[in-house]
Amino acid sequence: MLPPDWIEHRRADGEILGWMLAANDGFRVFDLLGRERTPEGADGIDWLAAEELLDDLGIGYLADRWTLLLPDGTERPVRIAEASARGVTVVADEFGAASAVGADPERFRLPFPVTGALAPR
C-alpha cells in the first residue's frame, strides 16, 4: 500500500514514474516497485533533481527479466506483468515462455513495495 506522504511524479503523457518523499532538506526517490532510488549516501536531493532522476529512470526497467526468490529458496525467472501501489504481479518466464502465444504462465502476486525477493536478472 502506498504510504500517504509519498508524492507521485508523472511524465508529460500522464504515466506515473514513481514517487518522492520529503526528507531532511530534500526528497527521497522511489520507483514503481517502491524501491528507493535516491543516490547512495544522500539523505535527500532537491525537487528538480528528484524529478530528473525519475524522468531518466523511466519505465523501461519494468520490461527487463527478473529473478523471484520463492519462500522455499528456489529462484524463478520472471517478468513483471503489472506494477502499481496495490501490488506487483510477475509471471514465470522460463526460456521466454511468458511471451509465447497461448502461454498461460504461473503468476505470483507480490506486495508493494517489493522486497528483496524480486531482483534484476
Image (tube, rainbow, N blue to C red):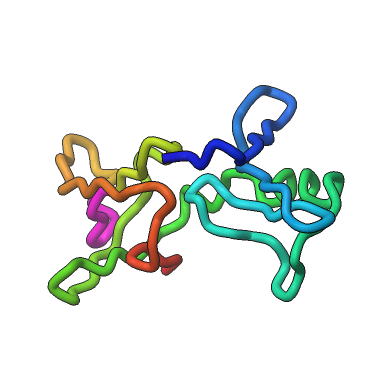
Where residue 104 sits in the image (x, y, percent)? 15, 40
Q: Of residues 84 and 59, which is closer to you in this image?
A: 84
Which quadrant is the C terminus positioned in? bottom left
Q: Is residue 84 above or below residue 115?
A: above
| Residue drawn at point x = 17 percent, y = 35 percent | 102
Q: Is residue 32 above or below residue 70?
A: above
Residue 93 magenta-highlighted: yes
Magenta region: which residues?
A: 91-97
| Residue drawn at point x = 37 percent, y = 63 percent | 118
Which quadrant is the N terminus positioned in? top left
Q: Quadrant of residue 23?
A: bottom right
Where residue 111 sits in the image (x, y, percent)? 33, 48
In the rendered view, does 71 fall on the left or right side of 37?
left
In the rendered view, does 109 fall on the left or right side of 19?
left
- Judged from this view, the residue extending furthest toward the front is 24
Residue 83 magenta-highlighted: no
| Residue drawn at point x = 84 percent, y = 55 percent | 25
Q: Of residues 86 and 80, which is closer to you in this image?
A: 86
In the rendered view, does 18 fall on the left or right side of 91?
right
Q: Of residues 121 and 7, which is closer to you in this image?
A: 7
